[in-house]
Amino acid sequence: ILNVEQSPQSLHVQEGDSTNFTCSFPSSNFYALHWYRWETAKSPEALFVMTLNGDEKKKGRISATLNTKEGYSYLYIKGSQPEDSATYLCLGPGETSGSRLTFGEGTQLTVNP
Amino acid sequence: GAGVSQSPSNKVTEKGKDVELRCDPISGHTALYWYRQSLGQGLEFLIYFQGNSAPDKSGLPSDRFSAERTGGSVSTLTIQRTQQEDSAVYLCASSLVGTGLNQPQHFGDGTRLSIL
């Protein structure tokens, strides 16, 4: 992996479902990994910043884990609600971005009532 | 407190005109970033400022794009001789500078630029 990659690209779930998605990044030269939520017609909002291998962060029903050795982070949403519908962006290290972090393409989540 | 402020919120201009976009970061934030999102695309990095200097301007798509920051605060992104492919939402973000890029970025509401 040369750059930050997110999967899946989009996801549709029913209200009440739990879901998770992935951010993958080159495991060499790790600095930090950020997760952002970007709702339609709003600006991106920071959810978590993680810096240590094994980090786990939680905010309400949303949590994230980090594995810097294998180069991935998972974002989990428990009991999805329609207001969770948004694009979730990962900001992490890329091989081609030097010391700067780079955004993945995002996972677009739609929660149907 | 005040967040990141961008102006104008919308700009419609004719192809070939110059435009200036403004970003007023959160007070005390020394790092400032410009991104853009073209239709159907993700966030594209344009330029990063640390104080008044730009250590990374690798994302500027052509020499028609330039940016400056004065007084370690307000930044302007200038696009000369605009083209239709410049149409996008231009987002500005600022952050404190922590160790190892561990400070979250705070985003403005963006400027929606439309080139006719």
Image (tube, rainbow, N blue to C red):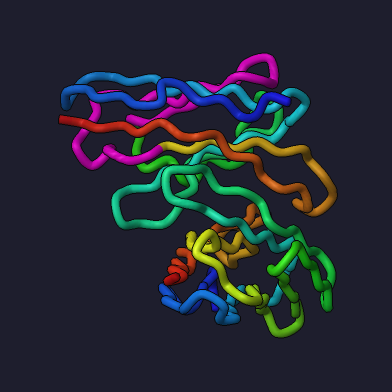
**Location of residue B21 by image quarter:** top left
Classify A51 as above or below B50. Answer: below
Identify which residue is drawn at 22% across, 19% down. B17
Q: Is residue A50 left or right of residue A88?
A: right
Quadrant assignment for the N terminus of chain A: bottom right
Q: Is residue B79 left or right of residue A56?
A: left
Q: Is residue B75 magenta?
A: yes
Classify B69 as above or below A33. Answer: above
Q: Nearer the viewer, residue B98 or A23?
A: A23
Identify which residue is drawn at 28% across, 38% down. B86
Percent position of residue A13, x then y: 46, 78
Percent position of residue B54, x then y: 61, 33
Q: Which of B60 and A41 is in front in this view?
A: A41
Percent position of residue A83, x then y: 53, 59
**Location of residue A113 by image quarter:** bottom left
Classify B29 as above or below A84. Answer: above
Identify which residue is drawn at 50% across, 64% down. A82
Residue A62 visible to the viewer: yes
Q: In this view, does B39 lie to the left or right of B57?
A: left
- Magenta segment range? B64-89
